Image: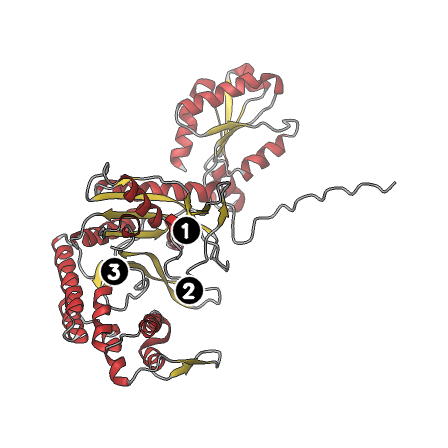
Amino acid sequence: MAKPKKTPRPKAQTPKGFRDYFGAEVSERAEMLQRIAGVYHRYGFEALESSAVETVEALGKFLPDVDRPNEGVFAWQDEDDSWMALRYDLTAPLARVYAQHRNALPTPYRRFAMGPVWRNEKPGPGRYRQFYQCDADTVGAANVAADAEICAMLSDTLEAVGIPRGDYVVRVNNRKVLNGVLETMGLDDASQREAVLRTIDKFDKVGEGGVRDLLGKGRLDASGAYIDGVGLSDAQADPVVAFLTSKGATASATLANLRDAIGGSSIGAEGVNELETIATLLEAGGYDAARIDIDPSVVRGLGYYTGPVFEAELTFEILDEKGRKRQFGSVSGGGRYDDLVKRFTGQEVPATGVSIGVDRLLAALREKGRIASQEVGPVVVTVMDRDRMADYQAMVADLRNAGVRAEVYLGNPKNFGNQLKYADKRNAPVAVIEGGDEKARGIVQIKDLVLGAKIAQSATLEEWKERPSQFEVPRDQLVSKVREILDAQ
């Protein structure tokens, strides 16, 4: 009789495109989200936590800013044959929530939301299929004052989490201005208009000359491959180039250049007027061009948005994987999307919002040294006598009741060295020791592990030698001494 085959053990590995987050990372993200939520709440926005799962019909058959409009989500068929999917962003669920509950919600409705989203896209370095987003949106306000408010709030948010002025800029543009440019070009063919939009999206990579080539006959890319152009004449391409290069020394100069680029287009003039209003409102609020700037080179998402668009860019330099200096880049983007709720209601509902890439913003804070690389662990109460566990639990209770993070060592207490190794692995700042002799004398030993590590690393420095790293105190002074050490650290 054949021996039955054993079921192979599952591989302990993270699914492709996903990752695990451990203590310090989770704590850092929670603290940052709390600071962001504080700014949003101060601006009058209310928290919303919607379902992570939506119907595919509600999500729509597209993702913003991707070339695969019918793909990109993790979807499955429910028992009633309807299709469900994990949300790919926090905006599409908002459109469904507002359409469903609009009679019970105030108008305008200000909401913020934070949480993971999932995209079924090809993963790559630093690009995951699950990531956190932090959004704020105003639904039901057609006035561009709502867009200006979002920009101001985004600026305040970056500063609240630790990005100082001078290290970021919020850049603002308007899709209507681009529509005016396309109108001036006389492009009626939808495929040509889409090709122009895709070309404009490449401006930050190929520059003015590259855009002009791609609008015309085409160009050789870095690999030597020839990329066909849109086939426009130089005269047709001129308004696009004028639009992309219209940034002036001041907001008024930029607006004047944009008016030249749009020619006689009424929709383009409407867009320029909106930008002018936004600039005026921001100036009144104390936001100068060093913080929030009118910049026509912001072209990301122009196929998705219907009016003003904005992007927060971090301007400080970092070193890439090859040691080359480069700017950190974008951590947030948003704009006006007046057509999204219309899918549910049949009526146009104005909306504007912003999304912050939480993981990128955390990476930026680490680059600036605003986040510690390692989280401080708990005070560890060591166990010298397993029969006296109640005494050790009482010590931990006293520390916890005083607001000090603490734990009792729960492994095998036989080897005291292993307990200190455990405390080191937990990044514990303090270890508490009470053997039988200490118990009889009514005292405890408190070991400053942070100072002890410094002494071990710099044993020749007299300044460390003169400072004790272990203290003997009465049992009733345990909490006060631990607090004193933690405060000194």
**Which numbered disc, 2 or 3, marks the residue that appears first in the sequence?**
2
For the residues bearing labels 2 and 1, Cβ distance under 8 angstroms? no
Identify which residue is drawn at 53% across, 37% down: 426
Residue at the far right in the pictured view: 1
Q: Which residue is mark 3?
A: 306
In the rendered structure, the answer to whether residue 329 lies left or right of residue 122 reads left
Quarter holding the C terminus? top left
* Residue 332 in picture, x, y percent from top left: 33, 55
| Amino acid at the residue labelled 3 | Thr
In the image, residue 463 above or below residue 166: above
In the image, 104 versus 418, the foreground residue is: 104
Q: Which residue is mark 1?
A: 88
Q: Secondary structure at mark 3?
A: loop
| Amino acid at the residue labelled 2 | Asp
In the image, residue 45 above or below residue 387: below
In the rendered structure, the answer to whether residue 230 lies left or right of residue 241 reads right
- Indicate which disc residue 67 carries: 2
Please tell me how crowded label 3 is: few (under 14), some (14-19), or many (20+) other residues with Cα within 10 Å.
Answer: many
| Amino acid at the residue labelled 1 | Tyr
**Separation (CA) of disc 2 from disc 3:** 19 Å
In the image, residue 436 above or below residue 408: above
- From this viewpoint, is residue 20 visible? yes
Q: Secondary structure at mark 1?
A: loop
Please tell me how crowded label 1 is: few (under 14), some (14-19), or many (20+) other residues with Cα within 10 Å.
Answer: many
**Which numbered disc, 2 or 1, marks the residue that appears first in the sequence?**
2
* Residue 59 in picture, x, y percent from top left: 38, 50
